[in-house]
Image (cartoon, rainbow, N blue to C red):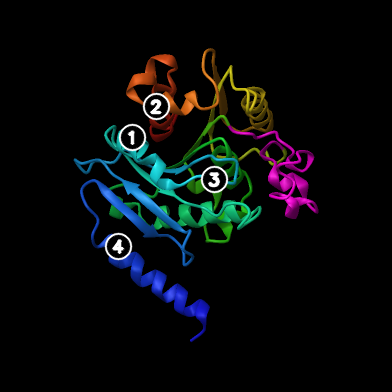
């Protein structure tokens, strides 16, 4: 047996074994692929009732981040009736584009296949991300090739919630990003969500802070406008008094008064689930 076959076999066994110890709060260190970085944490409502299942992709400029930073977020959303899956994904310099999007597709495939075990339904799957994670989320929804590699299509995504994502960025024009996205030189549009809009994209809610000095709010408003012009459903909301990191903090109790990020996210999900 080859090393690759051994790794895949061990991954399959470990995945089943880990899920067997699923608790009423969630599970940690669950493999969604055969590589060490391909693990995820799960948060589920204590009462077992799941409104929808969310794949959350964190930010970090494609160079940093870890799923365990998001325990509070996972627990907060689980308390509101959502199952939340937070995967790690490969980061630069250990990987370059499109490895992190491919990881997201594999994690989504895992979520799709295990939604019922988490108390949810594979027809109620959402993708959410912040910053670089929002960029990855929209690429997953707009470039069908990523999910088609796993016998799925973007229509499996009920909706996308993007927080402060760099959707219009041309990474090959930025010194700090050229190496991360060097593999996109032959097809540069493939790394730019704004260039991949199409009429049948999953509905998107794109949220941004007016005071964002890392990714300007035009990124969300321009992508939403392009999606609408192409015939897809999209909405951009810009909050006046928050910046790049506060938009994520607004999910938590002490920050919710700053912006209606949580309320708007829940309303978007509810509208999608009821056919809105």
Local secondary structure at mark 4: helix
The answer to which of marks 4 and 2 sits earlier in the sequence is 4
Q: Tell me whether circle 4 and circle 3 mark residues in contact (CB < 8 Å).
A: no
Q: Does the magenta stretch include residue 117?
A: no
Q: Tell me whether circle 1 and circle 2 mark residues in contact (CB < 8 Å).
A: yes
Q: Is residue 190 magenta?
A: yes
Q: What residue is disc 3 on?
A: 64
Magenta stretch in the rendered image: 165-194
Magenta region, mostly helix, strand or loop? Answer: loop
How many other residues sit within 10 Å of disc 3, few (<14), some (14-19) or many (≥20)? some
Q: Tell me whether circle 3 and circle 1 mark residues in contact (CB < 8 Å).
A: no
Local secondary structure at mark 2: loop
Q: How many angstroms separate mark 2 from mark 3 (CA)?
A: 21 Å
Local secondary structure at mark 1: helix
Q: Residue 18 carries which label?
A: 4
In this view, the mark in front (3 or 1): 3
Q: Give the left or right position of residue 52, taking residue 131 as reference.
A: left
The answer to which of marks 3 and 1 sits earlier in the sequence is 3
Where residue 95 appears, x then y in whole percent? 62, 57
Q: What residue is disc 2 on?
A: 251
Q: How many angstroms separate mark 1 from mark 2 (CA)?
A: 9 Å
How many other residues sit within 10 Å of disc 2, few (<14), some (14-19) or many (≥20)? many
Q: What residue is disc 1 on?
A: 77
Q: Is residue 247 visible?
A: yes
| Residue drawn at x 51%, y 27% as measured from the top left | 245
How many other residues sit within 10 Å of disc 4, few (<14), some (14-19) or many (≥20)? some
């Amino acid at each position: 047996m080859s090393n690759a076959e051994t790794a895949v076999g061990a991954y399959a066994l470990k995945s089943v074994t880990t899920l067997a110890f699923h608790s009423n709060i969630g599970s940690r260190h669950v493999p969604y692929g055969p590589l060490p970085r391909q693990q995820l944490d799960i948060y589920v409502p204590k009462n077992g009732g799941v409104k929808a299942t969310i794949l959350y992709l964190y930010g970090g400029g494609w160079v940093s981040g870890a799923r365990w930073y998001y325990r509070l977020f996972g627990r907060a959303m689980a308390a509101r009736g959502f199952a939340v899956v937070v995967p790690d994904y490969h980061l630069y310099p250990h990987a370059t584009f499109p490895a992190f999007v491919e990881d997201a597709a594999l994690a989504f495939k895992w979520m799709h296949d295990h939604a019922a075990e988490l108390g949810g339904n594979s027809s109620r799957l959402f993708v959410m991300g912040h910053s670089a994670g929002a960029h990855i989320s929209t690429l997953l929804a707009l470039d069908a090739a990523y999910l088609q590699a796993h016998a799925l299509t973007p229509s499996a995504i009920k909706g996308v919630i993007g927080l402060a994502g760099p959707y219009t960025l041309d990474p090959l024009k930025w010194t700090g990003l050229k190496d991360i996205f060097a593999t996109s030189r032959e097809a540069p549009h493939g790394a730019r969500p704004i260039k991949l809009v199409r009429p049948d994209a999953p509905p998107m809610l794109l949220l941004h802070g007016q005071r964002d000095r890392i990714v300007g709010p035009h990124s969300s408003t321009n992508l939403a406008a392009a999606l609408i012009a192409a015939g897809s459903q999209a909405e951009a909301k810009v909050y006046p008094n928050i910046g790049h990191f506060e938009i994520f903090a607004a999910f938590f109790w002490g920050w919710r008064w700053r912006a209606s990020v949580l309320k708007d996210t829940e309303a978007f999900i509810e509208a999608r689930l009821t056919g809105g």
